[in-house]
Image: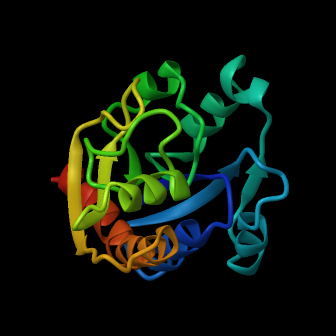
Amino acid sequence: MKRIVVFASGSGTNAENIIKFFNHTKTAKVTKVLCNNERAKVFERCKILNTNSLHFKKEEFFSSDYILNILKEEADFIVLAGFLWKIPEKIIDAFPEKIINIHPALLPNYGGKGMYGMNVHKAVAANKETETGITIHYVNANYDEGAIIFQAKTALNDTDTPETIAEKIHILEQKYFPKVIEEVILSTNA
């Protein structure tokens, strides 16, 4: 059974969904959730789901090997679920094609530094796009430029607002993210 460490920054709905999904498979298990925001709701979700979680500081992530050492001990795969910091190259190098992220748009559109959450949905709405979606991709040294693993689309109409777009994206994330993670893990076991 493979071990997944999830990085989260906020409410933790994607982290919760991933934990619940892998609690019912023999493929993998979430061993820990790491979070850079000590007030994030994800900690409450982890407590309810009996999943280990840890708050860490910026210097522990970027200036030391503290987080890297935890990952080497506890992770076969790393999943970013609403985590906003850029992953240091030393972690990327230690886990090649083993770090998976989800982006709330159809990359390469609406990607890059600062393009996350409502920033993406506002840009999609402002440009009057007729569709948007999610992109699940590997993480490399640049924001949102890793190889694309999977995309799912949803139609938009003239009445969609950033908030309704966010709801549509959330449905796609909940439906596909855990399944795609499992497919990646199974394909690397072959």
In-image side of 186 versus 114 (left or right):
left
Q: Is residue 5 visible?
A: no
- Residue 115: x and y in percent read 47, 43
- Give the image quarter of residue 136: bottom left
Q: Quadrant of the N terminus?
A: bottom left
In-image side of 86 versus 51 (left or right):
left
In-image side of 35 versus 2 (left or right):
right
- In the picture shown, does residue 16 fall above or below 120? below
- Residue 122: x and y in percent read 47, 57
- Residue 14: x and y in percent read 52, 68
- In the picture shown, does residue 140 fall above or below 5? above
Camera-side residue of 94 and 160: 160
Camera-side residue of 93 and 159: 159
Q: Residue at x 25, y 74 (%)?
A: 154
Camera-side residue of 9 and 43: 9
Q: Residue at x 30, y 62 (%)?
A: 128
- In the picture shown, does residue 10 fall above or below 23? above
- Give the image quarter of residue 69: top right
- Residue 178: x and y in percent read 38, 69
